[in-house]
Image: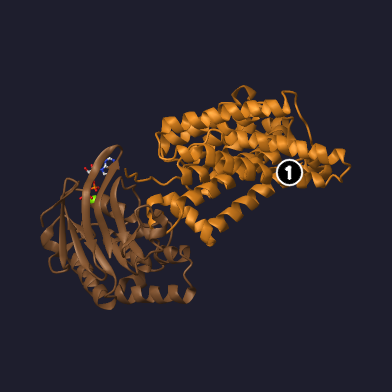
Chain colours: A orange, B brown
Amino acid sequence: MADWFAENGLLLGLALLDGLAYAALVFMVAVGLNLVFGVLRIVNVAHGSLFAIGAYTAASIGIFFASRGLPPWMSYVALVLAAVAVGAVLGPLIEKLLLRRIYGHEDVLQLLVTFALFMILEDVQKLIWGVQPISQDTPLRFLGTVDVPFGEDVIPFTAYQLFVLPGVAVATLLALAWFLRRTLTGRVIVAVTTDKEAATAMGIDAARIMLLTFTFGAGLAALGGALASPTTALVPGVGAQTIVLSFAVVATAGLGQIEGAALTSLLIGLGRSIAVYFAPEFEVVVPYLIMVAVLLVRPQGLFGVIETRRV
Amino acid sequence: MLELSGVSVDIAGIRVLRGVSLAVPPGGRVALIGRNGAGKTTTLRALMGLLPVREGRVALDGQDATTTPAHHRARLGIGYAPEERRLFGSFSVRENMLLPAEVLRLPRPETARRLEAVFTLLPELRELAPRRAAGLSGGQGKMVALGRALMVGTRAVLLDEPFQGLAPALAMRYAEALARLHQALPEVAILITESNPELLRSLVEATYVIERGEMAPA
Ligand SMILES: Nc1ncnc2c1ncn2[C@@H]1O[C@H](COP(=O)(O)OP(=O)(O)OP(=O)(O)O)[C@@H](O)[C@H]1O
Ligand SMILES: [Mg+2]
């Protein structure tokens, strides 16, 4: 054991740090997916596209800012701007033109429609941003690296991935928990999630809440993408990868609790990155192994409550 | 006056209500009696605007309300206690009761006044107020659902089979609460559905009977 650590300790440390940063991004996407499903009762396959478009838009704005000679800290403004823009434009557009027409329809139809949307958005991305990798890592370089002590060694790790990503995820979790619990709009969202018809009879305009929630969820996905953009070269396919992981998170966590989604993101993020470092051939399957293992024991998910469905 | 005239409703492409007509006068207490599957719940949902009306008319005090959006009906003073209590489980009893008042943006003093009036009418709710709704028993839940409906139901409350599943002692308490309600707030109309016509005899002034989605002689 001691020998193993002497040899692999550093790698494990890196895997943990990487996993934490990655979990933060997965959480941003999964929590939005969870919220949107709760209110709209639609599994939005195109949720990952919003992540990808958020990432590309952030990079484009960042590159534009740099070309104008704006200071590097402005690249952070670019991230936020991208998230807000993508959420505010694509959110209402998708909800009003597409989703609104399929509420309450069979699951298969809903899956097909959002899958079609995913395919369309993939092509739109290629049309706008091409297929060549795009990099814009000013936010990452701006904060530099930190030497993280790990046993005898130090691991140099970017401050952006160490602090900014987990920080934003934790802040999102806390803010969201507060919002859903303490504000009227938050409680109304919870009410519609619990029982749309009863909520409507209380005077709640469910259609408005669905639009609002979808826009908000789209913004969260885009923010996740924007935050991810400095850490990687953007290529077609990032959307698919993200959505698949966040499905695993949502299924493993079960529906309903955002704290559950956060812990599960951590579990799956760490699991995946440990696989990346120690058994790269399992990278893709580890999240699903975790998911299957959990669902075998607890079909409602780690934190899900068993729903009594009424017809 | 709450009125359905010749209302037909389809669910999943099947006609469930055929020309249903009934009228609930202001402050009136009316029963809608029917067997399982007769269309009682569907009638109340149509009144609440939760299902589209294919034919016929829904009217409130003579004003046509057939196409008034469902979420506006609470604003018109109609409270609804659905069949299975359908409370918001993660909220406390108090939060459940306050939600419709908050959604309608009632002034605080008015909300407080209504809450107090409901507590006076249904004293057990005062003790239950801080409890999580998910942890209530069936009978307690029905009381809370009634209280919640009364928070907005200044003109009428629609109660869907409130007695079903209640133990006799609880059913008695619920009936007493309804009698007190009529005394304390005589202007509030009450429409109750039930499968057993005997049960409501002393509580209501008028009875309608529904059979297979159609009105039948009482
Ligand atoms: N969601 C639905 N899909 C298909 N059919 C439905 C649906 N809801 C109700 N129905 C049908 O409509 C008819 C009336 O149902 P409704 O729920 O109004 O009856 P009810 O009088 O309230 O019965 P119960 O005493 O069981 O509550 C029934 O035949 C039922 O099968
Ligand atoms: Mg019924």
Q: Residue furthest top?
A: A281
Q: Which chain's residue wears label 1?
A: A
Q: Residue B162: x, y in percent? A: 24, 60
Above or below for B8 versus A22? below
Q: Please name the residue shown 39% across and 73% down the image.
A: B115
Above or below for A282 versus A78? above
Secondary structure found at label 1: helix
Q: Which of the 4 image quarters holds residue B139?
A: bottom left
**In the figure, is residue B49 to the left or right of B163?**
right
Q: Residue furthest right?
A: A69
Q: Residue A243: x, y in percent? A: 57, 33
Quadrant in which the C terminus of chain A appears: top left
**In the figure, is residue A105 to the left or right of A78?**
left
Residue A63 showing in the rendered view:
yes
Q: Please name the residue shown 71% across and 32% down the image.
A: A11
Residue at the spot of label 1: A79
Is the CB atom of the residue marked by disc 1 within 8 angstroms of ligand 1's nearest atom?
Answer: no
Residue B165 showing in the rendered view:
no
Q: Residue B136: x, y in percent? A: 33, 60
Above or below for B148 versus A68? below
Q: Please name the residue shown 43% across and 60% down the image.
A: B91
| Front-lying residue, A17 or A209 | A209
Q: Which of the 4 image quarters holds residue A234?
A: top right
Residue type, label 1: Leu
Quadrant in which the N terminus of chain A appears: top right
Which class describes the residues within 10 Å of circle 1: few (<14), some (14-19), or many (20+)?
Answer: many
- The total number of labels drawn is 1
